[in-house]
Each structure stands twice: as C-alpha cells, then as structure tokens.
C-alpha cells in the first residue's frame, strides 16, 4: 500500500514531540498565556528586559521629566522592551499603534502628601485585559504602616492575574525611614515571590545584591531610584545584571538624564549586549555627540 506508507511517513512517529522548557527562572510551570506575556516583556534571546518606568504620576503628579509624556517619553518607546505606566497615561497619551508590551500600575491611593503605604488595588484586572496589558505592577510595603493591606492587595491581584494569565510584578516599596540593605530586600523580595508574584522589582544595594537575587525564586528587575550621574547609573545597572537581575525597570535615571535617548540606548546595550559600564558610558557620550 504505497499511499498508506506515504501517510505514515508524515506522522514521523520515530520523532518524539519536543517538551520545551521556559527561559525565565521559576516560570516554567506557568500557563501559556502567562508565559507568552512574560516572553513579550523579557526578551527570550537574552532572558532580560529594559522596562521604562513612567508610572510616577500615580502618586507624584507631573514630576520632573514627566510633565509632558507625549513629548518626552513617546519618542523613547522604540528603545525600551516594555513600558511601566498607568492606565490613565496609556489611554490618554500612548499611541494604540505602539507594539511594545505595556505593564500597568495597579495600585494607588495616597499622594506624596500622605502615608504612602496606605494603598489599595486601583485597577480591575478586567481593565488590564481590555487594555491588552502584558502585566500589572503593585507596591508591597514590607515593614510599612499598612504592610498587611499591601500584601493582601498583591495576593488579590495575583489571584486575578492567574485567572486571566496576566503576570504580576511586585514592587518592594521601601519607606523613607527604613534601612535599604540586602537583609531587608531579601525579606521583601522573598515574601513577594512566595505569595505569588511572577516577578519582583527591587532596588540595587552595593553589598550582597547577589544574595537578594539568589534567594528570590522568580526574576528580579532592578528599580532605578533617585537620579544619579549617568556613569554611576550605568554601573549600577551593569552590577545588578552581573549579580543576577533579569533586567531593569528604570525611570528617573533615564527620563531625567541630560539625554534620555542616549541613556536608554546605553542601558539597553549593558543589559542585552553585555557592555561594561565604561563601554556603556562611551556609547552614551558618542550618541549625544552624534545627535
Ligand atoms: C516606586 C515605583 C515608581 O513609581 C517608579 O517605577 C520608580 O522608578 P525609578 O525609581 O526608576 O524612577 O515603582 O517604587
């Protein structure tokens, strides 16, 4: 039966179906939609991401560098891997033609005038889906006045995210009067991961950051923090990556830079192309000269 033989060959019964693993730490057992969204935020080729954080207005209003997001941030979109913003800015300012993944700020409540840990969930997961979000982000105030509430906000958001396949980024929010060291960040990152966040955003510390990433079973992205001189910010991003971070979610150190476009390009090269801080800073300067 020559015809049956031909059909049999098409099934390639001698070749077992591949069982692909997943490139992100701690994420291999997630569902397809969740992994697909994570693979839009984190580049599968490098396993890393450069997220651009511009969500500050949710408690700070029009902070320096974000007065006109249409003018200062929209031109930077092609240079980031994902944008971290509020749904208000997304709907009002970000062009719907933009194909970059959007991670949406999902907590809020107090302004800079009040106790910051007094947050609530400030967005329905249904709206994140409606907006085609690649993820949502929420503050967790370990040691803060409203610690339990902020943890509970996150677990509720994680439950909703699991229902619909939307990853949650838990952010370690460090109160102004708290010590920001590796011991604290290990505690905060681990609690956030144990309670279900798919990845964690946290600050860099020069002593022991590798213990923070090692003790966290899911990917960590480094928060930028206050504006530093460009060379220092590039060094911090480099060190964080060397010490186990899966990327960065930087705001002020990019949009408050003298040249945000050159800065994000240099950060991108450090995160994805393994440039050293010196090479990154040279790249930053030469991009400014060329523009
Ligand atoms: C605070 C936040 C911010 O709103 C923001 O994303 C921080 O970015 P940066 O510190 O790099 O300016 O998450 O914890």
Image (cartoon, rainbow, N blue to C red):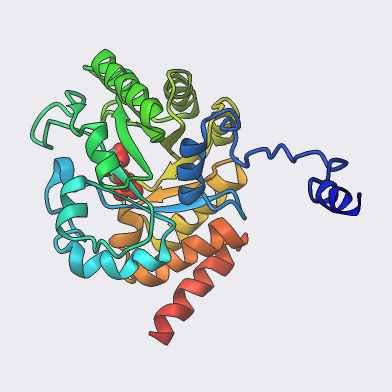
Question: With respect to residue 10, does 163 lie above or below?
Answer: above
| Residue 208 drawn at (x, y percent) | 56, 32
Q: Is residue 124 visible?
A: yes
Kindly indicate the quadrant of the structure image that contains residue 172.
Answer: top left
| Residue 159 drawn at (x, y percent) | 36, 21
| Residue 44 drawn at (x, y percent) | 59, 51
Q: Is residue 276 visible?
A: no
User: Which residue is pictured at 61% across the width and 53% down the height?
Assistant: 46
Who is closer to the viewer here, 121 or 174?
Answer: 121
| Residue 79 drawn at (x, y percent) | 41, 66
Question: With respect to residue 92, does 212 lie above or below?
Answer: above
> Where, quadrant-wise, is the C terminus in this rendering?
bottom left
User: Which residue is pictured at 24% across the width and 64% down the height?
Assistant: 95
Residue at far right of view: 1
Question: With respect to residue 62, does 127 lie above or below?
Answer: above
In the image, taking residue 268 as reference, residue 256 lies left or right, namely: left
In the image, taking residue 201 as reference, residue 30 lies left or right, namely: right
Kindly indicate the quadrant of the structure image that contains residue 14.
Answer: top right
Rendering quadrant holding ligand 1: top left
User: Which residue is pictured at 45% across the width and 68% down the height?
Assistant: 265
Kindly indicate the quadrant of the structure image that contains residue 128.
Answer: top left
User: Which residue is pictured at 27% across the width and 66% down the height?
Assistant: 74
């Amino acid at each position: 039966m020559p015809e049956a033989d031909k059909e049999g060959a098409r099934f390639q019964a001698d070749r077992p179906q591949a069982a692909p693993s997943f490139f992100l730490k701690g994420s291999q057992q997630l569902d397809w939609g969740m992994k697909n969204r994570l693979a839009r935020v984190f580049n599968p080729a490098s396993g890393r991401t450069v997220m651009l954080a511009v969500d500050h207005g949710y408690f700070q209003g029009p902070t320096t560098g974000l007065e006109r997001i249409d003018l200062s941030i929209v031109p930077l979109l092609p240079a980031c891997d994902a944008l971290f913003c509020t749904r208000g800015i997304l709907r009002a300012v970000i062009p719907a033609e933009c194909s970059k993944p959007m991670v949406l700020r999902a907590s809020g409540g107090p302004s800079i005038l009040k106790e910051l840990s007094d947050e609530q969930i400030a967005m329905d997961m249904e709206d994140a889906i409606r907006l085609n979000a690649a993820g949502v982000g929420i503050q967790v105030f370990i040691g803060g006045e409203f610690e339990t509430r902020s943890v509970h906000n996150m677990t509720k958001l994680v439950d909703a995210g699991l229902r619909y396949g939307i990853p949650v980024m838990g952010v370690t929010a460090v109160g102004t009067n708290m010590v920001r060291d590796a011991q604290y960040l290990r505690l905060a990152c681990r609690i956030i991961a144990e309670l279900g966040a798919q990845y964690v955003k946290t600050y860099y510390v020069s002593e022991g950051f590798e213990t923070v990433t090692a003790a966290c079973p899911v990917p960590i992205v480094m928060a930028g923090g206050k504006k530093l001189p460009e060379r220092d910010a590039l060094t911090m991003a480099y060190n964080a990556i060397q010490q186990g971070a899966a990327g960065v979610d930087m705001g002020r150190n990019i949009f408050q830079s003298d040249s945000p476009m050159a800065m994000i390009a240099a950060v991108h090269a450090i995160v994805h192309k393994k440039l050293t801080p010196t090479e990154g800073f040279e790249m930053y300067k030469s991009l400014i000269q060329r523009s």
